[in-house]
């Protein structure tokens, strides 16, 4: 197939099963059948079908949009894609309404192409494909780990190279510039399928880096960090930082509610930490090569109000 057609192997196999592929005029159903030089192959690609997903008029913070893709700043509390527990009110439902007829179709359906996700209660930047060409190009960049992704997080403790405890944490090391590197395998937890677990055999390779941005408290009991991903696994930053002993503030799954010394923070700061309703994690920077134009794209999203207000209280 011509590269510009942006038809995946899966899509082509489905088209063959539907009788949409002919070789020398005869319908070809077998994807493994051999072809000979001079054969004429015809592929009929119908117009994209309407999706079963319902458009919903939900306001979006659109950072960039063109014919092939859209970059949005997702608020905390919004699920990316409909699922049994969240059938509506998702980013995809909102994009269906926002984009309307501008969706040229992904996989034969008029729907946005999701190439990466961030958790429901994580805020920040996402890029979504509006065309097959963009979907394939973006997916290839995420698979090759060439997409630039930086996050801001607020964690318990201070991840510092001078902490001898961290040097004893399996999978942790430090790079120049006081950059903490966490290298493990990740897989679903054996007993709790909603959680991820750190492994060193089996699972999927995962690498996270974190740099200290600011410390809070006297003595220092909290810190703001900048994280960037070499790989993109489910809950990766949350589970990796918890493994290192620096769980995220407000994370109900991995962070826990730790007791902090009363003298370390003001009463207002302690109350704000205890009341923060979600993991303090924000996808702040997203960079990639435009899959159609080839232009280098880079976007930044400021901290959302709840996160910024929490840092202001901490001083």
Image: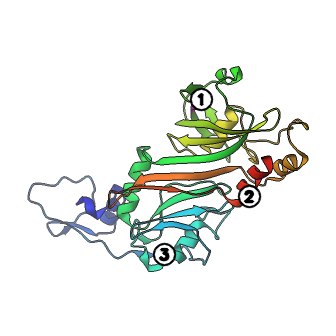
Position of residue 181 measured from the top left corner of the image (x, y, whole percent)? 57, 31
Asked whether residue 149 appears in the rendered view, the answer is yes
Label 3 packing within 10 angstroms: few (<14), some (14-19), many (20+): some
The residue wearing badge 3 is 99
**Of the two numbered discs 1 and 3 in the rendering, the one whose residue sits closer to the viewer:** 1
Point 63% across, 24% down: residue: 170
The reply to whether the magenta stretch includes residue 156 is no
Quarter location, residue 208? top right
- The residue under the point 59% across, 26% down is 171
Real-space Cα distance between discs 1 and 3?
43 Å
Residue 295, located in which quarter of the rendered image? bottom left
Q: Nearer the viewer, residue 160 or 147?
A: 160
Task: Answer with left or right where residue 296 lies relative to residue 256.
Answer: left
Query: What residue does disc 2 label?
Result: 306
Secondary structure of the residue carrying tag 3 is helix
Q: Report which residue position mark 1 lands on.
A: 178
User: In front: 70, or 178?
Assistant: 178
């Amino acid at each position: 197939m011509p590269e510009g057609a942006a038809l995946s192997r899966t899509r082509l196999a489905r088209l063959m099963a539907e009788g949409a592929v002919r070789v020398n005029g005869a319908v070809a159903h077998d994807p493994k059948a051999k072809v000979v030089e001079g054969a004429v192959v015809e592929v009929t690609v119908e117009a994209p079908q309407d999706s079963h997903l319902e458009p919903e008029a939900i306001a979006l913070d659109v950072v960039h949009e063109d014919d092939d893709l859209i970059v949005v700043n997702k608020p905390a509390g919004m699920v990316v894609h409909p699922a049994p527990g969240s059938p509506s009110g998702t980013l995809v439902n909102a994009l269906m309404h926002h984009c309307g007829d501008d969706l040229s179709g992904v996989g034969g359906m008029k729907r946005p192409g999701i190439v990466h996700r961030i958790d429901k209660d994580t805020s920040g930047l996402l890029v979504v494909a509006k065309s097959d060409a963009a979907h394939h190009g973006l997916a290839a960049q995420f698979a090759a780990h060439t997409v630039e992704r930086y996050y801001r997080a607020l964690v318990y403790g201070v991840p510092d190279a001078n902490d001898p405890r961290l040097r004893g944490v399996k999978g942790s090391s430090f790079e120049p510039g006081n950059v903490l590197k966490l290298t493990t395998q990740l897989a679903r937890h054996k007993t709790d399928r909603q959680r991820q677990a750190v492994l060193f055999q089996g699972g999927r390779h995962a690498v996270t880096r974190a740099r200290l941005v600011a410390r809070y408290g006297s003595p220092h009991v909290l810190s703001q960090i900048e994280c960037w991903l070499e790989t993109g696994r489910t809950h990766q930053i949350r589970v990796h930082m918890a493994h290192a002993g620096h769980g995220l503030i407000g994370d109900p799954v991995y962070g826990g509610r730790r007791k902090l010394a009363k003298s370390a923070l003001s009463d207002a700061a302690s109350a704000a930490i205890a009341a923060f309703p979600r993991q303090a994690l924000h996808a702040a920077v997203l960079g990639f090569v435009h899959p159609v134009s080839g232009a280098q794209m880079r976007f930044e999203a400021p901290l959302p109000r709840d996160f910024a207000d929490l840092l202001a209280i901490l001083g």
